[in-house]
Image (spheres, rainbow, N blue to C red):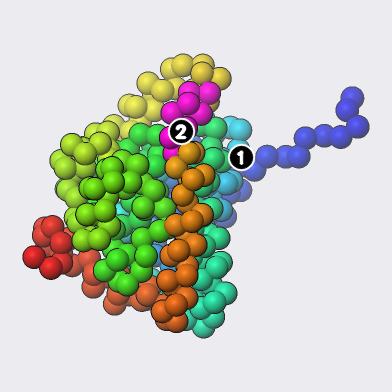
């Protein structure tokens, strides 16, 4: 018998409870895990706390060998269009500290963990209007609600779009389309996202979960080793993109963040900026 034993991996029942205020989790017997981000049971309202929880969750779920495929979704009719009214009080109190802890460290972990810390296939669901779509766009497969529109709000709230959304847009849209989307806050509807190759399929919102499980069943039909090694092949472009550009983008964004000497994450900044998306307009200036 070996002189040492394996360190116990995380247990689903334990981390499901630990993350319940941020994610609803279900897991089938075959290891397909459903992870649904929420704030008080509704669409995510961005905060320092749930920003950190995302990276923590990804690392834990990715390190549990009993998980075989992850489906990641938002909640309700919107993906993320708002911020917690007091969700950035910590940042206001100590901008220099949280610009690193929140904007740089946690943000980098959130994006890189999705690509580097998972040995299993991932399916992202963009369930409604929202920003920070990179979290589901950078999954191996992505489904989008046909009613939804995605956009990046950074430039229009005086922030540099360097926190991973630039990686997703440049990889999926190409240089010119990404530049337009990042500079204008272009609201990209589901048919356009499908045409551009940002997502794989679009469906009515209430059909997305069932469709994700159909895809999961197909993927799960192959042996475990085949599934896991295939993810490493199909993620190589993302791994290169993250390695080459993620840290630099975050560094530039953080410099701009600190240079302003004020938080740009208030509810007024974020919720007010997205009005044109809900109204069905392409941007907030035409």
Please indicate whether residue 49 sits to the left or right of residue 192 in the image: right
Magenta highlight on residue 18: no
Residue 137 visible (yes or no): no
Q: Circle 1 — which element?
A: helix
Give 114 or 180, whichever is nearer the viewer.
180
Q: Which residue: 51% across, 71% down?
A: 99
Q: Which residue: 43% across, 72% down?
A: 257
Please indicate whether residue 259 sits to the left or right of residue 11 in the image: left
Q: Is residue 33 above or below residue 15?
A: above
Q: Which residue is mark 1?
A: 63
Q: Is residue 54 above or below residue 221?
A: below
**Residue 103 percent coordinates (x, y):** 48, 65
**Residue 73 percent coordinates (x, y):** 36, 46
Q: Which residue is mark 2?
A: 235
Stretch in magenta: 229-238
**1 or 2: mark nearer the eye:** 2
Please indicate whether residue 136 sits to the left or right of residue 197 in the image: right
The secondary structure that dominates the magenta segment is: helix
Quadrant location of the N terminus? top right
Say few, some or many: other residues with alpha carbon within 10 Å of mark 1 (under 14 / 14 to 19 / 20 or more): some
Quadrant location of the C terminus? bottom left
Give 182 or 199, whichever is nearer the viewer.
182
Residue 154 visible (yes or no): yes
Q: Earlier in the sequence, mark 1 or mark 2?
A: 1
Q: Circle 2 — which element?
A: loop
Q: Is residue 36 above or below residue 7?
A: below
Q: Which residue: 44% across, 57% down?
A: 249
**Residue 81 percent coordinates (x, y):** 28, 62
């Amino acid at each position: 018998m070996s002189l040492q034993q394996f360190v116990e991996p995380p247990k689903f029942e334990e981390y499901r409870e630990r993350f319940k205020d941020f994610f609803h989790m279900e897991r089938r017997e075959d290891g397909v895990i459903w992870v649904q981000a929420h704030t008080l049971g509704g669409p995510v309202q961005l905060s320092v706390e749930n920003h950190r929880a995302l990276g923590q969750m990804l690392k834990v779920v990715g390190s549990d060998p009993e998980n075989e495929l992850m489906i990641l979704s938002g909640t309700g009719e919107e993906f993320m269009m708002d911020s917690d009214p007091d969700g950035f009080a910590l940042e206001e109190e100590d901008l220099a500290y949280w610009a690193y802890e929140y904007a740089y460290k946690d943000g980098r972990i959130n994006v890189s963990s999705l690509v580097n810390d998972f040995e299993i296939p991932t399916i992202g669901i963009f369930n409604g209007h929202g920003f920070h779509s990179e979290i589901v766009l950078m999954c191996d497969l992505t489904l989008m609600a046909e009613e939804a529109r995605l956009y990046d709000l950074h430039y229009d709230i005086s922030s540099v779009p360097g926190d991973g959304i630039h990686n997703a847009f440049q990889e999926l849209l190409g240089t010119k389309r990404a530049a337009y989307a990042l500079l204008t806050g272009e609201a990209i509807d589901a048919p356009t996202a499908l045409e551009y190759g940002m997502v794989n399929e679009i469906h009515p919102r209430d059909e997305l979960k069932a469709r994700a499980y159909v895809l999961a069943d197909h993927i799960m039909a192959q042996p475990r080793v085949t599934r896991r090694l295939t993810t490493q092949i199909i993620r190589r472009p993302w791994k290169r993109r993250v390695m080459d550009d993620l840290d630099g983008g975050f560094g530039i964004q953080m410099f701009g963040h600190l240079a302003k000497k004020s938080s740009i994450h208030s509810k007024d900044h974020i919720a007010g900026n997205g009005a044109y998306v809900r109204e069905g307009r392409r941007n907030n200036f035409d």
